[in-house]
Amino acid sequence: MQGNKKFWVIFLSVIVFFGGAFFQILESSRFSKRIIQEQTYSTLVEHAEIMRNNFQQGAEGQFMLMQNFAQDISKKDGFILENNFDFREDINLMSGFDQIGIADQETGMAIFDDGIRLDVSDREYYKNAIHGNSSIDFFQGEGDETGHLFFSMPIYHENEIIGVLFARANHEWMDKYFRNDIFDGYGFLCVTDNQGDMIGFGNQKNLVEDQNNILEYFSTKKISTDEIVENMGSGLTHSFAFINDEEEWCTTYLPLAINDWYLFCSVPNEALAPTDGTYVLLEKNHIIKVLLIYSAACILISLLIWHERGEIKKENVRLKKAEEFAGMASFEGDYKKDTFVLNENYFKLFGRNPVYKKISDFTTPPPDILEEDHEVFLKMGRDLIAGKDSGSVQYRLFSKDGNIQWHQFVFHVCYDKHGLPLKCYGMIVPIDRHLKLISKLQMQVEKDPMTGVLNRTAFELYVNLCFSGDSAEQNHALLLLDLDNFKQINDGYGHILGDHALVKTADILKVCVRSSDYVGRLGGDEFAVFLQNANKEQAAKKAGEICQALENAEMKSNEAVVTCSIGIACFPEDGSDFNELYGLADRGLYRVKESGKNSFSMVNDND
């Protein structure tokens, strides 16, 4: 009876697979065409992405040139257009631009490298720059048949915008990135805005029949543009086919990642797709492969029926090897028998036999786990004994070489039809390297790279966290510290000594405070110390210690003496968050600056 059942299983399986093979042969022609079309789309998308990436990199390079130029301009005393007119001598250094100009921030009056003056206050690239944004904009003046791309950026002096630097990209620079030679001169490329209006074009513009809007062009080819408009509004990449003069063409459009512009690439299929002979060969090969695959599948079905147990055993062997390679130890528990069995990888990992033999043994922690992690491990053990559906815990234990390492215990419980726990499965996974990597990455994100103390973002985050929970009931103090005459140290002794002074200051601050306090560098020579659970008297005493420690510090030059001015604000009297405390502490700091420096001051709202 069992043999007949297997026979019918094999017979029906063969019928199903041969029927599928026959159907697949009928569909092979359509399938082959679809493969070729997908390959065509994929190839065109790859080319379009390359051109987009090249364009973005080229634009970044131009912005870097302009940024260096803007920095040179900002260093000059007094921003007067006539005083900066000698920038026209630098046009040869600004490759890719055929015209550059500088505009006044207040009036919008601009002077170009050829001496022409013009009011550009109504142009988008000027408006973007005076609001602090570097941008690329398209501008087409009267009588200009093609229009131009304008790069613009603000000119800063002491963190204030004093003017606008802009430059017009020449056509050679545009042609460099919108090339058609990758398609052997076939097809066309163009950049449009999200309404389809053309901004830039490759050297085959005549192919679009003098259209200035790409959507209108595709409408003449009987392509519904509604989907194109929707995809462009959502920032999607898409491809489609159309007929152009009785020839099949392929078009890909994708966001340029600049403004809301899009890059369109249209190429005849023959420029990308395989030849007809290749298609016929692909179709024949596909039919042969289908027959071979389904014939082999019928044979394999029979073998799988008879060798099911052997495959399961092989799978277990592979799983065992994978666990051994990954350094994991799996386990299985039986609630009815109260057993807990770990595989032999446990001994290889820890050099000792498992402590637990039963699920009920998890009421006590094993001796190799650090005492600090006993409670979290026992909580997981109680969940396991109670039959909770799943659980996980991270803990530290002593490995077989005596080092302390992090591990994770993960389990999942299976239930019987009555909802009672039946089996538990899981593994013990070493995660020491993973956690160390996370810790290293966290330090790179939070720390100031020069001094090793917290950066401004991390410092502000940790300070604000102290104003919630149990810490909100305590007194805290923010000490805002600024080095005195730091600019003179940089100018008189050089930036190397200046950097050394910053690092030395950070080291002194870390020594002066407790491990529970925070030290951060907010920028430049401005530091901050946050004292947890400290009142005003303690904050003032600590500020005095810091001033004295800095004054007594030894620098690389015996002539350089570093002192500081400190402003103090306290929580909760002076503010309820970092920004409020910072504002008052900053007032106190500048009070010290005005009264002789090298001291500290405490300010509140009544001052």
Image (tube, helix red, strand yellow):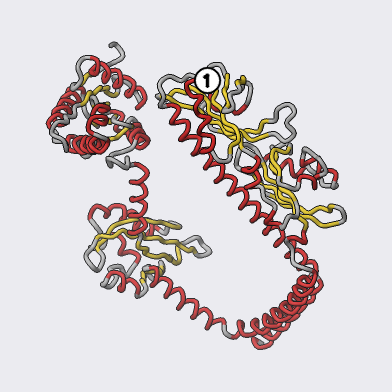
Q: Is residue 44 above or below residue 508?
A: below
Q: Position of residue 593 (x, y in %)?
A: 24, 18
Q: Front-most of 195 and 27?
A: 195
- Which of the pair 54/79 is nearer the observer? 79
Residue 356 higher or lower than 481, as above or below? below
Evaluate whether residue 207 shows in this view: yes
Which amino acid, by three-letter code, is at mark 1? Gln
Residue 362 lies, in percent from the top left, at 31, 61
Disc count in the image?
1
Q: Position of residue 574 (x, y in %)?
A: 30, 19
Question: Is 202 situated above or below 365?
Answer: above
Mark 1 lies on a secondary structure that is loop
Q: Residue at position x 45%, y 26% from top? A: 156
The local crowd at label 1, few if under 14, some if 14 to 19, many if 20 or more residues have their Cα within 10 Å, is many
Q: Is residue 260 left or right of residue 413?
A: right
Label 1 sits on residue = 105
Residue shown at 66% from the left, 54% from the top: 45
Query: Does residue 409 appear left or right of residue 37 in this picture?
Result: left
